[in-house]
Image (tube, rainbow, N blue to C red):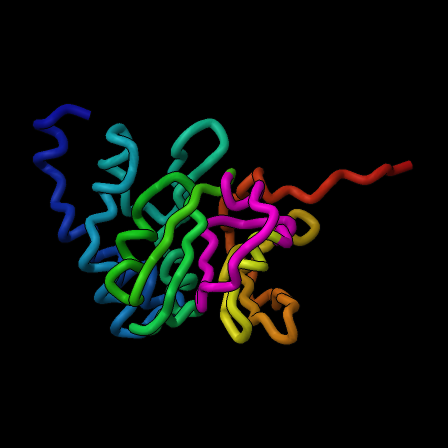
Amino acid sequence: MTVATEAKIDFSAARRAMIDSQLRVSGVNAEWVLAAMDRVPREDHVPAQARAHAYIDRAIPLDDVHALPAPLVHGQLLSEAAPRPGDKALLVSCGSTYLEALLRPLVATLDVVSAAAAAAQTKGMGQHSLIVIDGAIEQLPAGLAAELAEGGRIVTGLVDRGVTRLASGRKIGGEVALLPLADIGIPVLPEFAAPKGWSF
């Protein structure tokens, strides 16, 4: 895309259209969520060649295996996470800084790790009250679950028999159980694939 072409794009208008035509009509109506997504220029958090369609209602490829979820996914993730000013949050990144920019002003502290680092983690400190995963996982590694404090919340995408769903859970008695909430297209994070078993 040329500079001249980009200059013709009214990103503010595109952001408002995203809010009115994608989020509100799909039930994302909390004013704090809409304000956060109006505040952050999504076009600044996608590859340069994707800036012109930063606000389309679909995922945007970031590399050969990762993608930035559609705006509605982030609206639902934020709504379900309900970040609090006192939260010590952990974000598992898909490779874009967009969700980080949305979350950081809403919590006390925000630590960010790549999907690869989070999937490889073998033990955690149990110090985060909120974990948000920017993508869909097949399994939650024990090391990442161990990062969640007792009573802490986790919000993620979950892959179940090839279908991706928004899911959330809490850590109770040292265990984390994820509850699927709604079917929605969420890019899969391959780092969290479940081990393949034998099939006959």
Give coordinates of residue 21: x percent, y percent.
Answer: 29, 60
Residue 61: name its quadrant: top left
Near-viewer residue (77 or 128) = 128
Residue 110 on the magenta span: no
Relative height, residue 43 to residue 161 (above, below): above
Q: Residue furthest top?
A: 2
65 vs 139, left or right, is left
Magenta stretch in the rendered image: 117-142
What is the total number of numbered labels drawn onto the structure image? 0
Residue at x 41%, y 63% (from the top left corner): 76
Q: Quadrant of the N terminus?
A: top left
Q: What residue sits 31% from the left and 66% below the top?
A: 107
Quadrant for residue 67, please give it. top left
Q: What is the residue that sits farthest to the front in this orientation?
A: 125
- Residue 151 on image: x %, y %: 53, 75
Answer yes or no: is residue 163 visible: no
Residue 197 vs residue 45: left or right?
A: right
**Front in this rendered view, residue 90 or 136:** 90
Q: Is residue 186 visible?
A: yes
Q: Nearer the viewer, residue 71 or 156?
A: 156
Q: Residue 56 is drawn in which quadrant?
A: top left
Find residue 24 and report its horizontal and vertical position in percent. 32, 67
Q: Please determine whether, in this image, residue 11 is positioned above or below residue 84.
A: above
| Residue 11: image location, x then y, percent | 15, 46
Q: Quadrant of the C terminus?
A: top right
Residue 100 horizontal side relative to residue 91, left or right = left
